[in-house]
Image: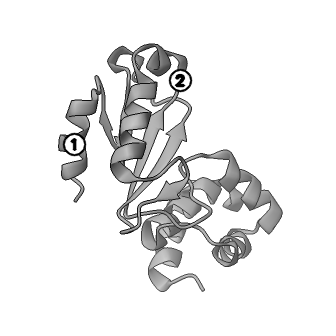
Amino acid sequence: MLSAAEREEIEQVLKHYPVRDSVAIDALKIVQRHRGWISDETLKEVADFIGMTPADLDGVATFYNLLFRKPVGRHVIALCDSVSCWIMGYEGIREYLSSKLGVGYGQTTADGRFTLLPIVCLGACDRAPVLMVDGDTYGGLTPAGLDGILERYR
């Protein structure tokens, strides 16, 4: 069941939209911020609240790669796998992260701290290779520099 705080936040955002279902992405982001991810049950509750079918809202949720439809770790690492990042050393970064964390893409570390995900583009090609942790973007990555980044999220 949507909490009172979630309902209130969604209602506040709704004031900026002329049509109730236009708030779909914002509503899902609000719920995810509170819960960490969007379960099937939660998606149905949000859909009912904003006047959409669960199928239509799921189409929105699964289109955006930063809306999580299964549990994730406390920190989500999104590693850019665009052409620019590939050219600038993405594979070495991915291999180092996978080895260091003991996980592959779509997996969460045993301690629940990190989930590693690919992302198509972070819009920072001039700083490739690039990753984002919880909304913080880091560029010009090297395997040696990754330890310091990860340590910030311990």
Find numbered disc 1 in the image and state the secondary structure of the residue it sits on.
helix
Residue depicted at x 36% and y 69%: 111
**Seen in the image, is 77 located left or right of residue 61?**
left
Q: Which mark is residue 147?
A: 1
Side of 52 relative to 111 (left or right): right
- Position of the C terminus, as image quadrant, is bottom left
Q: Is residue 107 left or right of residue 62?
A: left
Which of 122 and 18 lies nearest the eye of the viewer?
122
Vertical relation: 95 (above or below) 101: above
Q: Residue at x 40, y 20 (%)?
A: 89
Q: Is residue 131 above or below residue 140?
A: below
**SS at badge 2:** loop
The quarter holding residue 90 reads: top left
Q: Position of residue 115 (x, y in %)?
A: 45, 55
Quadrant for the N terminus, please.
bottom right
Pointer 2 residue: 82
Q: Look at 62% across and 62% down and name the residue there.
A: 69
Give the amino acid type for the residue marked by disc 1 in the picture: Asp
Measured along the vertical axis of the image, is residue 139 above or below residue 3? above
Of the two numbered discs 2 and 1 on the same chain, state the one appearing first in sequence.
2
Query: Where residue 149 sits: x, y (%)?
Result: 22, 43
| Residue 4 in view (yes/no) | yes
